[in-house]
Image: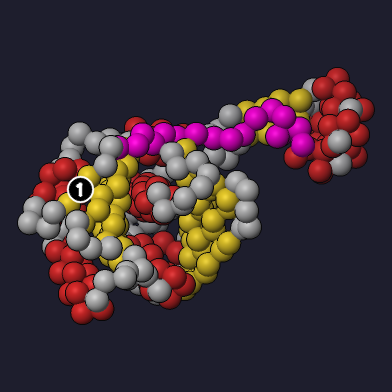
Amino acid sequence: MTNHDTRQQFLFDGTDIRGEITSLSSSYKAIVNQQQYPETVATLFGQFLVAASLLSARLKYSGIVTIQAMGSGALTTVMAECAEGSKLRGIVRGEFNGLNKAHKLSDFLGSATLAITIEPENGERYQGIVPMDADNLSDCLEHYFNQSEQLPTQIKISADTNIASGVMVQQMPSRQAQEKTTADWAHVASLMKTLQPEEQLTLSHIDQLYRLFHEEGVRVFEPQDLHFFCSCSRHRTERALLSIGQEEVIDIYKKEGVVAITCEFCAEQYHFDKKQIDAMFKGEKSLLH
């Protein structure tokens, strides 16, 4: 594997089928190491990060793609987002004990729904929600595309504690004859189903695509780097405290001797003493303005 923390687009010549392939390593492990997730939880989380990366490549504009599962099981939330096409972050919430043998999505999340949110930098926010009835995330995402966007889609995502990798192919709206479009898609989809998890976790992007589609005339584009990035800052933390209100913030200070906020995404800590709290609320009007 030589494509750690990159994503590449590819196209099938003579068709309207396009694809994305991505692999995460250091960006994935940076987040997992911050949170110290158990192995099974980390592996599931890696799949969500890959999915956010794959879906963000579909955006034709700057924005944020968020994939969030909300369940009734031991895990209540699994969330991953990709901003500006390359900045990854995410979080898992819930009770991690007893999940060392979890395998299916229902083992982790119980009854769950999957929400995919697209937030353009300059545009209207969109969200699609589907039930998570399948055993794995790949099948849930395929169901989302088939139901919400009517785009035939094949997705394969695999992860271990070191690497998370995924491939997605989609049949885009086509002007070609329906018979040819249907035949082309059926052929590519059948080849995708032969891809094995161990191949995704050990082979480079080019080797994976050659193994699958070496007779199909695939054009592969330059890779795009991906990395862990958290958008937290002291300024944003101050604004969050302002929204709570001075009385409650002062009450926290009196009880704790300091107001300490820890970012749940990157574990960065922000501390505020009495002088800083007073100055923050004295400047509230100008800050909000």
In this rendered view, identify the residue nearer to me: 32 or 185: 185
Question: Can you give x and y, in whole percent of width and height, for residue 244 in the image?
Answer: 81, 43
Question: Can you give x and y, in whole percent of width and height, for residue 172 in the image?
Answer: 34, 65
Split into 4 quadrants, where in the image is the C terminus?
top right
Question: Can you give x and y, in whole percent of width and height, for residue 250 in the image?
Answer: 87, 34
Q: Amino acid at mark 1?
A: Arg
Q: Residue at x 86, y 41 (%)?
A: 245
Q: Is residue 225 above or below residue 106?
A: above
The quadrant holding residue 225 is: top left
Question: Can you give x and y, in whole percent of width and height, for residue 146 in the image?
Answer: 38, 73
For label 1, the residue is 219
Q: Residue at x 82, y 22 (%)?
A: 276
Q: Relative to 197, is 170 on the left or the right?
A: right
Q: Secondary structure at mark 1?
A: strand
Q: Is residue 27 above or below residue 98?
A: above
Q: Which residues are magenta?
A: 223-239
